[in-house]
Amino acid sequence: MENTKSSRSKRDRPKIGIEPWGVSLILGILGVVILLVASSPLGKSIGDALNALFALNSVQTMWYITRASGLVAYLLLWLSTAWGLAVSSKILDQLLHRTFTYDFHQYLSLFAIGFTFLHILVLLFDGFMPYSVPQILLPFISPYRPFWVGIGVIGLYLMLLVTITFYIRGRIGMGAFRAIHLLSLVAYLGAAIHSVFSGSDTSLWSVQLLYVSTFLVVVFLTAHWLIRMALKKAWLPRRT
């Protein structure tokens, strides 16, 4: 009876579209290809052609793209973190199918990584302060606010690590998966610190309000999750 219910739930599992592992594979391959091409002579030729067509060598253009993609990446990472905490606390169970909320959490993480890659790849073409590939990939060697930018780089690597565990949790076990998944909170904190102290829009009151409100939401959901876990551990011995 239990096996029949399990197989039926798998058949009835809602489909969002392409599988999350396919999205991550596409984004990963695309990011590597863009990085390799951008650092090659072919990348320079493509860049010159695009500049002639769309004036992408304008300092303002790259600056706007970097700012916009950075803010979008932060919002997606925040939403992924908040959504994951809500899923862990079972807050959404009465509203949405649990499998949908779980898959949607994966998609949010992947899109956050995608916009983060866009945010950093644009720096290779920045006419005001161009970055090299090592300066993008290695923390604390950035020509601009190296410590705060380095915190963001570490946050990106933690995001990648947590996302990878989605697809290998069967091999590493659920205990290790949950332990590594806690690093998503550290990744979000790193991204928040990076955004506040190295973001060019931090001086705007609207952006400050954005950072404060989103951070408080994560603090509230984290406290809710911790309290729920503590109550669950305190209740289990009584039931046994």
Image: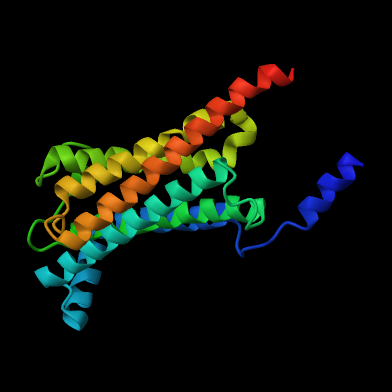
Image quarter of residue 137? top left
Question: Residue at the spot x=52%, y=51% of the render?
Answer: 106
On the image, which quarter does residue 116 sit in?
bottom left
Residue drawn 10% across the image and 47% down it: 144
Residue 67, given in percent of the width and then of the height, sits at: 21, 62
In the picture provided, is 91 more to the left or to the right than 238?
left
Asked whether the viewer can see residue 137, the reply is no
Based on the displayed image, in which of its 4 quarters is residue 30 positioned?
Answer: bottom left
Q: Nearer the viewer, residue 50 or 152?
A: 152
User: Which of the image's four quarters has the C terminus?
Assistant: top right
Residue 49's x, y, as percent?
21, 76
Q: Residue furthest right?
A: 1
* Vertical position of residue 131 compared to residue 145: above or below: below
Between 171 and 151, which is closer to the camera in this rendering? 151
Left or right of residue 195, residue 87 in this image: right
| Residue at the image point whose x is 21% and y is 59% from the top | 207
- Regarding residue 169, the answer to whether it shows in the image is yes
